[in-house]
Amino acid sequence: MTYSTSLEGRSRAQRINACKGITAINGIVVAPGETFSFNQTVGSWTKDRGFMKAPVSYNGTLLPAFGGGVCQTSTTLYNAALLAGMEIVERHHHRFMPGYVGAGLDSAVAFPDIDLRFRNPYSQPVAISASASSGRLLVSLVSTEEFPRVAIEQKINSVSEPIKIVGAQGGRIRRIHGKLGFDVAIYRRNGKNFEIISHDNYPAMNEIVQKS
């Protein structure tokens, strides 16, 4: 099962960090009954390991931090795992919706405490094939056993609009671009089995315009 996300609009540092995450998970084999941990596999996002400072959102404010962009790798892997029928053990959503995936389908990670973990429920090993090319991250889960046909369903319960906050009169620059907020549930249908995967609430991010 394969899933991809676009790197369009991402900074050079975010792309580098995302690709380092891709390299770390590529070729990993998850044995039957084994639980995969993204953080244990990728390791710490430090300068000495080649990670760069890139924008990371802290309560809506973008601040530079080592490893910014790695969450796009974990998100791409998460969706491939959903489609492959993996048992999701741990997954966290961002406070505000990232732009590279649909509402409710992101997977935030922060070393070492906020992790993405999933268990292989099958009787055969599952291998992770991950790459970055043509401006996209691509993650596939592969097994000698055929995966069941899985459908992922998104139900958006409500959408909230951002508020535009404007400073004094005069020249203005946009400090923060507003984002829609969502209350959203994700379901997975596997044959006759129907399960709720997550129910997330993302507040709207207000647009901040200040005097230049």
Image (cartoon, rainbow, N blue to C red):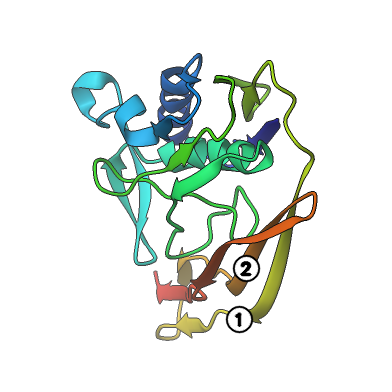
Amino acid type shown at disc 1: Glu
> Can you give x and y, in whole percent of width and height, for residue 137 in the image?
60, 29
Look at the picture and state if 107 lies above or below 66. below
The foreground one among 169 and 197 is: 197
Disc 1 crowd rating (10 Å Cα; few below 14, some 14-19, many 20+) is some
Q: State the residue at coordinates (71%, 69%).
A: 155
| The disc label shown at residue 67, or none | none
Amino acid type shown at disc 2: Ala
194 relative position to 122: left or right: right
Look at the picture and state if 5 lies above or below 170. above
Q: Which residue is mark 1?
A: 161
**Image quarter in which the N terminus is found:** top right
Classify mark 2: helix, strand or loop: strand
Q: Quadrant of residue 4?
A: top right
> Can you give x and y, in whole percent of width and height, for residue 85 in the image?
64, 40
Alpha carbon of mark 1 to alpha carbon of mark 2: how far?
Answer: 19 Å
> Can you give x and y, in whole percent of width and height, for residue 139 in the image?
61, 27
Residue 147 in sight in this render: yes
| The disc label shown at residue 185, or none | 2
55 relative position to 201: left or right: left
Disc 2 crowd rating (10 Å Cα; few below 14, some 14-19, many 20+) is some
> Can you give x and y, in whole percent of width and height, for residue 91 in the image?
44, 51
Q: Quadrant of residue 126?
A: top right
Residue 69 in sight in this render: no
Look at the picture and state if 118 lies above or below 155. above
103 relative position to 72: left or right: right
Label 1 or label 2, whichever comes before in sequence order: 1
Q: Are marks 1 and 2 in contact (CB under 8 Å)?
A: no
Q: State the residue at coordinates (39%, 66%).
A: 60
